[in-house]
Amino acid sequence: MSAKRPKVPSELRRRVLIEAGHRCAIPTCKSTPVEIAHIIPWSKVRKHEFKNLIALCPTCHTRFDDPHSPIDRKAMREYKANLNPLLSVGLRNREGQAALLAAYQELRARFADWVPAEVQHAAAKSRRSSSLTEVADLRSQSIHKFSWAMCAVLDFQSAWKDSEASGLAGSILYHVAEWSDEIHDAPFPLPKEIGQRDITEEISEASTELHLMVCEELSM
């Protein structure tokens, strides 16, 4: 880093990391650890702005910086938009729209933290080589993250009241939670029919529907 280039302020860095769930923003990656990357290069903008920053793992960051990489600036803007759907929209605070968006962003961040923890727990319990201590530790971590996800859903439902989006958020939570309970109650190692379920794919359609509901309500 050039001596003339200031560090990304800690609070701004924190916002970017939270936006991506402390994981790589490219959805097919989601690796850790991550770095803060500029979508439009620092050499051109000469400043740190939230709308131009994104969390990337070192590998994806290097690929993005490669001029011959298929990960171009347009693709990176789309990845950023997927993390923050109203990034480029002038959001009005009419009828509490800002609060609705904040509740949705918190919901997304908590699910991005919780669901992978459940998947990791299931993967460990599926392996005969895993120790019972490892499985128990991962279960404990997933329970902790579930509690935050539950709080986020309750806050979302409080903000969105009796809307269809509110009900759908609860349905997604309970679908994943039921699968988690099934894993916990099953013997070790997990039967294949349970361990091989792709919970991310199972909630994909409902998650997309929820996202579109939010975008429509907030006039994207």
Image (spheres, helix red, strand yellow):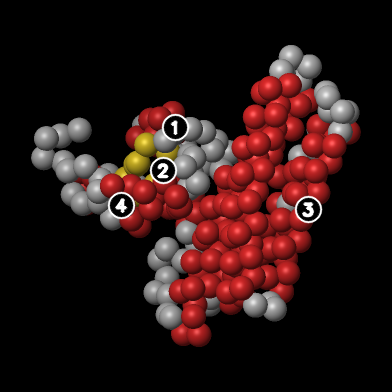
Residue at the image position 42 percent from the left and 80 percent from the top: 92
Q: Which residue is under mark 4?
A: 11
Q: At label 4, which amino acid type do we have?
A: Glu
Image: 196 above or below 147: above
Task: Name the residue located 38 percent from the left edge and 53 percent from the top edge.
Answer: 15
Q: How far apart are marks 1 and 2 (CA)?
A: 9 Å
Which is in the foreground here, disc 1 or disc 2? Answer: 1
Which of disc 4 and disc 2 is earlier in sequence? Answer: 4
Which residue sits furthest bottom?
95
Residue 95 place in picture, x, y as percent: 50, 85
Q: What is the crowding at mark 4: few (fewer than 14 residues within 10 Å), some, or many (at least 20)?
A: few
Mark 4 or mark 1, earlier in chain: 4
Three-letter amino acid code at disc 1?
Pro
**Viewer-nearest residue: 189 or 88:** 189
Q: Earlier in the sequence, mark 3 or mark 4?
A: 4
Gap in angstroms between the C-alphas marked 3 and 1: 29 Å
Which label sits on residue 33? 1
**CA distance for labels 2 and 4:** 14 Å
- Find disc 3 in the rendering and name its residue: 175
Return the x and y of residue 104 as percentages of the image width and height.
55, 64
**Res 220 seen here:** no
Q: Mark 2 points at which residue?
A: 55
Q: Earlier in the sequence, mark 1 or mark 2?
A: 1
Q: Which residue is drawn at 39% across and 74% down?
A: 90
Q: Which amino acid, mark 3?
A: His
Q: Which of marks 3 and 2 is in front?
A: 3
Q: Earlier in the sequence, mark 3 or mark 2?
A: 2
At x 53%, y 77%, the residue is 219
Task: Characterize the local packing of mark 3: few (<14), some (14-19) or many (20 or more) Cα atoms within 10 angstroms.
Answer: few
